[in-house]
Image: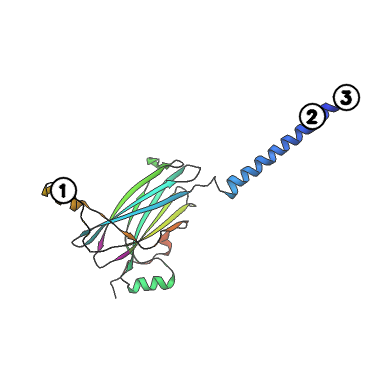
Amino acid sequence: MTLQVLKTVAEICQSFAIAGATLFGGLWAYHKFVQQREDKPNVETTHIVSYKVIESGYLLSVVVRLRNVGKVMVSMRLLKVILGQVLPLTEGVLKEIKSGGPPPEIDRRTRVWKDSENACLEPNEPQVLTFYFTVPSTISLVEIETFFRDESAENGWTHRTIASLSRKTPTKRRTEGMSNESAELLDELIMVPSEPEGPDSPDSKESDPDSRRKPKAQSPI
């Protein structure tokens, strides 16, 4: 076998190697960015719900934790926290249950990030926000729904939690060694963790929930 033949064989082998590497790279990119959508933003939402019994009902605290679980940066634009009445049953609640819609709205909070704030979530970066609501004492079960949207109108994430409320006096914290004034102040600051009614709904990419919501809750039947 002459040197020229060896050179030709080597060039052919090199061409096959380059073609194989290109094909492998293309398949890898397709798997990562098309099948696994790693080029798309992905945000995980969790809720921590607690409350304090007050004279008029409840002071409800909703801690919303956003975390960028994707591979690309997410520009923060809008967060809605919507509180809905589940129990007691009202005409509005019954109507929504039958139609498959969300429970009637009690109240809401909205956070809008302006362009000047340049608010972004880097990959694996969390953002925690706290919102407060007052809830009438007649309500015993609520739904918390959050809707987060990035700067594009195409990407929105919804998360829902069902939480129960009770007028029963919670067990107080141990206050041995404290003055009466300090112990009373500590008791005033206690926020009772709300008992979840079943698992949270998984995050879902949806349109703005206002497109399917009805007026606020009516009085109990």
Three-letter code for the amino acid on which mark 2 is drawn: Ala
Residue 114 visible within the image: no
Q: Which mark is residue 176?
A: 1
* Residue 56 vs residue 119, the one in the foreground: 56
Q: Secondary structure at mark 1?
A: loop
Q: Which mark is residue 10?
A: 2
Residue stretch rendered in magenta on the structure: 134-141
Mark 2 and mark 1 in contact (Cβ < 8 Å)?
A: no
Mark 3 and mark 2 in contact (Cβ < 8 Å)?
A: no
Mark 1 Cα shell of 10 Å, populated few (<14), some (14-19), many (≥20): few
**Residue 209 placement (x, y as % from top left):** 42, 60
The residue under label 3 is 2
* Residue 214 vs residue 122, the one in the foreground: 122
The alpha-carbon separation of the residues under discs 3 and 1 comes to 96 Å
Nearest-to-viewer mark from 3 and 1: 1
Mark 1 and mark 3 in contact (Cβ < 8 Å)?
A: no
| Vertical relation: 210 (above or below) 125 | below
Three-letter code for the amino acid on which mark 3 is drawn: Thr
